[in-house]
Amino acid sequence: MVNIYKKYSLKIGLVFTIVSALMTTFVLSALFSGDPRMNEFLYDCGIDMLGGLICAALYFGCMKQSGEGGKVFRSLIVLVSFVFFINELMYCVYRVPEKIGLCMFCVLCSKIADIVMIYLFYTYVKKTLGLDGKMRLWADRGFPILSVFEIIILLSNIIYPTTFSITSEGVYQAAAMSWLEDIYLIVALTITAILIIRCGSPRNQKLAALTFIFLPIIEFVILGGQFGSAGQYGTVLMSLVIMYCVIFNYNSSKLSATQAELDMATEIQASMLPSIFPAFPARDEFDLYASMDPAKEVGGDFYDFFMIDDNHLGVVIADVSGKGIPAALFMMISKTVVQNYAMLGIKASEVLRRANEALCVQNKMEMFVTTWVGILELSTGKMNCSSAGHEYPAICHDGKFDLLKDKHGFVLGAMDIAKYSDYEIQLEKGDRIFVYTDGVPEATSEDKELYGTDRMIEALNTCADGTPKDILNTVRESVDSFVGNAEQFDDLTMVCLEYRG
């Protein structure tokens, strides 16, 4: 039962809210609108009808919100829709003597719900706007004190009717100073409008949120809990609508700033990867093409190729642990370190050893990177290679791709005493080498099935005689076709090198 609730809680909450709105709008008002005793309350019923419908719209609008804030807000909207419903029911039995007990029950439920509603609203604001410093200190102190007074007033009314009473004729009677509630509503609406207009800064938005919380609870204490007027519920609902917009605007501003920074980081990362093809138009001994598609705005994969000297071409592909900004930062450091050592003209294994030692220094985040390095001697086709835990390369000899299950060393950045070994590939004219990150074989379909290296090799062999660019496009199309509408899980990076002799 618990699992069913967790799975369908959003739908259950939405259905309840919509049903409450429809009940309020059509059923109860239709049943009692013909009763002359109800005529003076039809306007108030109309306010509640509108309120119930707005609650349903708000709930539907926030269904996809994630995190604790979204959960609290959904609970809050369901509670407010319940308050509107119970308040409408109270109106229906307001002057029906035989329903005195039901009327008293509805009033008490409504007032108890008010307390819970304000508490949930306060929790929502704290989680979503992130109240801190003195503002949160005073709010955390003031809220319990006022809540205690509110509860005492409400409970005392059960013993002695000081805040409201139900006469023997079924008439709900408020306190003598009920006219102050109208003044309160005007003041609350005015302050609300001013704060919203001035809500340009996070501080003002937080103050506005606290005003929406504390004004109703202070009014409850001062005026004896007179929440009988439909105008009060209208104010509470308006507060919810406005705060939803304010918090959405507040979060949108933060997201916009974050998005701008991510866009800049994406541009910086893209500019660090060689992206102009053909890369070396003056060299006819080889052709290569590369691509990197991050799963997020920025990724942890990288590739690189560079001329070490006039006769040696360096090729690197790597995959940093993790995703997002941290992986991107570590990626930039790793790329620079590996390239710097490769330009010394040393063997691939020595490049990895020195890069590993450098990356292990001050690596407090304990990140690591799988790396494959290949150094091609253009005059002979001999390629000196070494792998730090990276994926097996695919080699094309005689027009057919096969995986080369090379010996793996340990990943870079994890253990400074790791050793790495070399191996050699002899490329003949027309041979190709394809290297990639695990985003290719681990691409996942909607049925949670992995793409795998077998499908990758099959795709490679459908275009084995194509250009490096054609080969990469073919593999990417094959991956996209397999994945379908499933979300890209990992960065997807590929490099293809053709040796022309």
Image (spheres, rainbow, N blue to C red):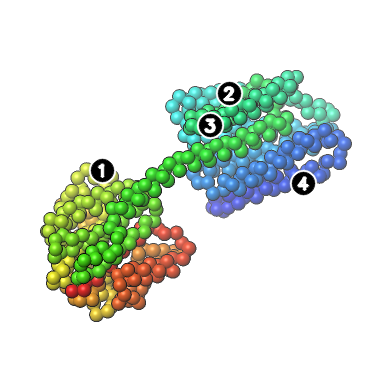
Residue at point 28% right, 53% down?
272
Residue 176 is left or right of residue 458, and the answer is: right
Query: Which residue does the image show at 32% across and 47% down from the upper left?
Result: 326
Q: Nearer the viewer, mark 4 or mark 3?
A: 3
Residue type at the position of mark 3: Cys
Q: Mark 4 or mark 1, which has the lower sequence index?
A: 4
Q: From what the image shows, is residue 76 above or below residue 269? A: above
Q: Amino acid at mark 1?
A: Lys
Q: On residue 199, which mark appears? A: 3
Whether tag 4 and tag 3 are in contact, CB under 8 A, the answer is no
Characterize the local packing of mark 1: few (<14), some (14-19) or many (20 or more) Cα atoms within 10 angstroms.
Answer: few
- Secondary element at image label 2: helix
Q: Are marks 3 and 2 in contact (CB under 8 Å)?
A: no
Q: Which residue is mark 4?
A: 26
Give the CA distance from mark 4 to mark 1.
Answer: 63 Å
Dot 1 falls on a residue whose secondary structure is loop
Dot 4 surroundings within 10 Å: few (below 14), some, or many (20 or more)?
few
Using residue 432 as the reference point, say whether residue 443 is left or right of it: right
Residue matched to label 2: 146
x and y percentages locating residue 388 in the rendered image? 22, 59
- Residue 495 falls in which quadrant of the image? bottom left
Residue beneath disc 1: 364
Distance of mark 4 from mark 3, alpha carbons? 38 Å
